Image (spheres, grey):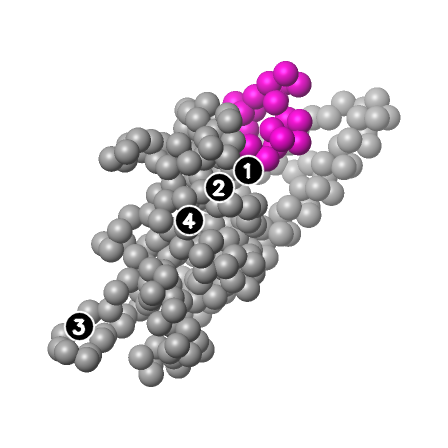
Amino acid sequence: MRELEARTGVNRETIRVYLREGLLPDPSRPARNVADYGEEHVRAILAVRKLQRDSGMTLPQIAHVLRGGAASRPVGATAFGHLEELVAARVGVRKSVVSLDDLVKQMTHAREDARVLDGIGAIKITKGPAGDVLSVTDAGLVNLWGRMREAGFNEARGFPPEILGYYIEAAEYVAGKEAQIFLEQVEGKIEEDEAASMLEFALPTMLEFFGLLRLKIFLRNIRRATRGETIVPVPPGENP
């Protein structure tokens, strides 16, 4: 426990609260009054802290999602990476998934949207003991499209969920290129821990960078269209 406190910067009383909330895997107990913690506990504790700090989620909200409930409020994209980190740390304890039935209670069209998104390869619906389930991240994607519907993006206005197909191609290209460049620059040159720290900072930062760049180009194209110019999307890998 002392080493766990030192590695995470979190005091033992807080760690015990995380354990009581079911956010961490149980430690191994080789003897009475002895508890052994591993790297999975370090990763899980840091993920909880980031969810609290960066996403403003409370411990009960985090626990609710990990027990298979849908997020009760919108959360940022980076939160899903931290939630999946918690899921990974707890593999073998119990698998965390979100029930599609729970999503339907929040969003009327969730089931149809999930099936379409599954069909175009954006998410993966799997069968659970009590029905269809999604990973935490995939549930987040369905939730995001549900929020788009609420804002007016629906079939009646020409925005069915199938329209998201082009995002998959763009994401595959961008994420693949990011991974290729990162590995080319660091493989065999820096230690694994340093590479992990760089990625921890880079992923949310570059997500924000890409979002701002996309907004800039989107508005530029809208201005061109209002002047009567034709908008021609540039295929990935080609210069505009």
Contact (Cβ within 8 Å) of mark 2 with mark 1:
yes
Q: Please give the range of residues in magenta.
A: 144-168
**Kind of residue indicated by mark 3:** Arg
Which dot, 1 or 3, sits closer to the camera? 3
Contact (Cβ within 8 Å) of mark 3 with mark 2:
no
**Kind of residue indicated by mark 1:** Leu
The CA span between labels 4 and 1 is 16 Å
The CA span between labels 1 and 3 is 42 Å
The quarter holding residue 15 reads bottom left
Q: Secondary structure at mark 1?
A: helix
The x, y position of residue 65, in whole percent, is 42, 49
**Prevalent SS, magenta region:** helix
The x, y position of residue 192, in whole percent, is 38, 67
Q: Furthest-right residue in view?
A: 227
Residue linked to disc 3: 29
Residue linked to disc 2: 140
Please name the residue shown 33% across and 54% down the image.
88
What's the mark number on residue 65? 4
Q: Secondary structure at mark 3?
A: loop
Image side of residue 131 versus residue 101, left or right: left
What's the mark number on residue 144? 1
